[in-house]
Image (cartoon, rainbow, N blue to C red):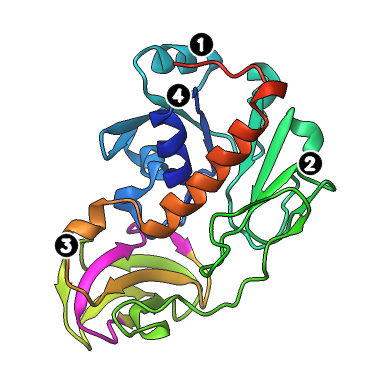
Amino acid sequence: MASGIVHRLNRCHMRVLITEVAAPTTVRRTVAFAEAVFTGRHAIEGVEAVRVSSPEEAYRVWESEGIPLFVDPDAKVREALRPEVLVDAILAKKNTGTDKSHAPLVIGVGPGFKAGLNVHAVVESNRGHNLGRALWEGEAEQDTGIPAPVGGYSEERVLRVPQKGLFKALHEIGDLVQAGDLVGQVNGYPVRAQIQGVLRGLLKDGIPVEEGMKAGDIDPRGEREYCYLISDKARAIAGGVLEAILHSLKDLNLQST
């Protein structure tokens, strides 16, 4: 979801930077700027993120209309760059420390934030009538824990980690798999597809994992192109974040690229 937000804001000529953890557990890696943590740079639909290590490098990336990415789990770089807007799109289902004192406009995506208390605005992340809605009072709906249906399948399309360990990927994103196919392993324990479809997401090989976490995502529609496009949900949430920023524009001093 965060990459969809970043992409939308960049396309609207806003200077955006990303902070990431050292070992992202992103599943939809082809459409996640977090992949730049490992590869140094990663492009999504014509927009590229570049891993940097200093504010000076960030400014150079902005000059080329790219997106600087810092490995900075605590977002300490904000103290040097002093952003006008901070968006917490970790989607941890809880607030991991974000406060509305961190920037003139602080936006929280999904559960764990309360508008007016720890953030200025909340954007709804739950599928349904309110998806992408910018809230200036109250909070987002609680996470249901149930994956949204795709092609008639819900939990069946999600691959889960069988136990704690290191994930070994045995397929690539974009591969067509059948029900029962071995897609990955953890300590020799299998991660198998439950349905037929295109492997839309898969954890990176060698990533440390915990039992029960999401390891992959199978799309039963079979459209390989979807592996490389931002999802409808991410675009809706991105629209809500953009709305919250534009609504506050008179109070901000946003810089364009």
In terms of sequence position, does the residue under pointer 1 or pointer 2 come before the other? 1
Residue that appears at 76% across and 32% down? 102
Q: Position of residue 188 (x, y in %)?
A: 34, 79
In the rendered image, the vertical position of residue 257 relative to residue 103, given as above or below? above
How many angstroms separate mark 1 from mark 3 (CA)?
Answer: 38 Å
Q: What segment is highlighted magenta in the picture?
A: 192-208
Amino acid bearing label 2: Asp
**Do the residues bearing badges 1 and 4 touch, measured as CB atoms within 8 Å?**
no
The residue under label 2 is 99
Left or right: 102, with 214 as reference point: right
The residue under label 3 is 224
Q: Mark 2: few, some, or many residues within 10 Å (few <14, many ≥20)?
A: some
In terms of sequence position, does the residue under pointer 4 or pointer 2 come before the other? 4
In terms of sequence position, does the residue under pointer 1 or pointer 3 come before the other? 1
Q: Is residue 189 in sight in this rendering?
A: no
The residue under label 1 is 56
The residue under label 4 is 52
Amino acid bearing label 3: Arg
Residue placed most toward the observer, 10 or 12: 12
How many angstroms separate mark 4 from mark 3 (CA)?
Answer: 31 Å
Amino acid bearing label 4: Val
Q: In the rendered structure, does residue 213 fall within the stretch colored magenta?
A: no
